[in-house]
């Protein structure tokens, strides 16, 4: 699209209408990019900002093909879409980002692992299974991951006992060895059609001990300069080998022995990059648009220390969402609230996030813990 982006009637089609789509559309509105969004839910957050919002099944071949007919560029905000439809759109001359061949690898955690093996990228030792193996055939402790359709900590479980094992579904899966993790980090990479890429400095993540879901993301991380550089180089190598176009989030483990291991990747804007909205020169959402629309990369520099706090549904509540404790927080300098517009909450569902920016990460971390304790995402009934 190049120089025609800001003076044309070209259309960007986004598959998926969740919070990632909504935040991408904020920049589309600012730039006056015409957008259409497909999502199965009539109350999806992105409906609020799309020029054309369509309710439909992302996994249905004909629905996705029909949706893409009037688009010039097709992108995603969720991996679980019909790949064959994307191949068809690509053959029809539509620009599809990420490429269907790339997405086909990433959709399946098993294919991802095989890709890392084939390219000799470091990752946790693992075994793949077409169905749930017998209890006697696994060694504990281990990490179980469903091959498909996992998200936000769902589809991932640490297995220590037979009771843990009995609670998981019988689906294709991978079993990973537990490794001694020192730090969990993420690198947001942007790669364009010409094979050029830029990346943000790694951010560090802290996870809920039971839910396998990130609670805090912060920058600067505690890694030393060599570790930061090595992480960026590894993430960019992954993007190149995948021939990815757009934003790629690369989650990494720094293990206690000092090596970096790839956990998994996401071919879209990612929770670990949300703090770029307030803390970086260019947000991950703007960077994604720049990349897929053929525009120059934006500056990836962080100009604030920052920490992001995920707001998730409290246990024991499901129904119309109620946010408790938010109003008083707004007097805190450098605090930014993002509510995703989801009508209903349920336990551990991502409902929003808060980003704190400043000049001292230690102070920000203390404030973030207070925020986490003060805010409750509940429903009007339990």
Image: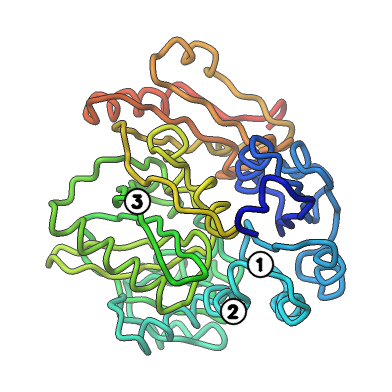
Q: Is mark 3 on a helix, strand or loop?
A: loop
The residue at 71%/25% (across/down) is 380
Callout 3 crowding tier (Cα within 10 Å): few <14, some 14–19, many ≥20: many
> Of tags 3 and 1, which is closer to the observer?
3
The residue identified by callout 2 is 104
Measured Cα–Cα span from mark 3 to mark 1: 26 Å
364 over 108 or under it: above or below: above
| Cβ atoms under marks 2 and 3 closer than 8 Å | no
Residue 166: horizontal and vertical position, in percent? Answer: 52, 71
Residue 155: horizontal and vertical position, in percent? Answer: 54, 65
Residue 152: horizontal and vertical position, in percent? Answer: 53, 54
- State the image quarter where residue 280 is shown: top left
Q: Residue 80 carries which label?
A: 1
The residue at 86%/54% (across/down) is 55
In the displayed structure image, the side of residue 225 where residue 99 appears, left or right: right
Front residue of 99/305: it is: 99
Q: Is mark 1 on a helix, strand or loop?
A: loop
- State the image quarter where residue 381 is shown: top right
The residue identified by callout 3 is 200
């Amino acid at each position: 699209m190049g120089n025609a982006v800001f003076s044309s009637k070209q259309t960007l089609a986004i598959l998926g209408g969740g919070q990632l789509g909504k935040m991408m559309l904020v920049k589309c509105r600012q730039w006056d990019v015409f957008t259409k969004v497909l999502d199965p839910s009539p109350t999806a957050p992105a409906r609020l900002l799309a020029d054309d919002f369509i309710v439909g099944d992302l996994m249905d071949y004909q629905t996705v093909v029909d949706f893409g007919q009037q688009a010039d560029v097709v992108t995603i905000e969720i991996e679980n879409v019909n790949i064959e439809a994307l191949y068809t759109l690509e053959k029809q001359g539509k620009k599809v980002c990420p490429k269907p061949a790339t997405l086909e690898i990433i959709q399946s955690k098993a294919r991802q692992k095989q890709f890392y093996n084939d390219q000799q990228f470091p990752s946790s030792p693992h075994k793949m299974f077409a169905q749930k193996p017998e209890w006697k055939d696994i060694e504990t402790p281990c990490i179980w991951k469903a091959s498909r359709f996992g998200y936000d900590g769902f589809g991932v479980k640490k297995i220590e006992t037979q009771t843990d094992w009995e609670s998981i579904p019988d689906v294709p899966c991978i079993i990973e060895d537990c490794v001694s993790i020192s730090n969990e980090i993420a690198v947001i990479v942007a790669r364009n059609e010409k094979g050029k890429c830029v990346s943000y400095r790694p951010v560090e993540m802290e996870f809920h001990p039971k839910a396998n879901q990130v609670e805090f993301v912060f920058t600067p991380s505690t890694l030393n300069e060599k570790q930061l550089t090595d992480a960026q180089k590894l993430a960019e190598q992954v993007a190149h080998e995948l021939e990815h176009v757009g934003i790629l989030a690369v989650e990494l483990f720094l293990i206690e022995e000092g090596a970096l291991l790839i956990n998994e990747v996401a071919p879209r804007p990612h929770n670990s990059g949300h703090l770029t909205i307030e803390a970086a020169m260019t947000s991950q959402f703007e960077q994604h648009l720049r990349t897929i629309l053929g525009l120059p990369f934006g500056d990836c520099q962080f100009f604030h220390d920052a920490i992001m706090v995920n707001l998730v549904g409290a246990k024991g509540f499901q129904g119309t969402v109620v946010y408790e404790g938010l109003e008083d927080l707004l007097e805190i300098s450098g605090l930014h609230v993002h509510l995703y517009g989801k009508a209903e909450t349920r336990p551990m569902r991502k409902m929003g996030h808060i980003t704190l920016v400043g000049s001292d990460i230690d102070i920000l971390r203390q404030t973030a813990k207070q925020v986490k304790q003060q805010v409750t995402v509940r429903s009007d009934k339990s």
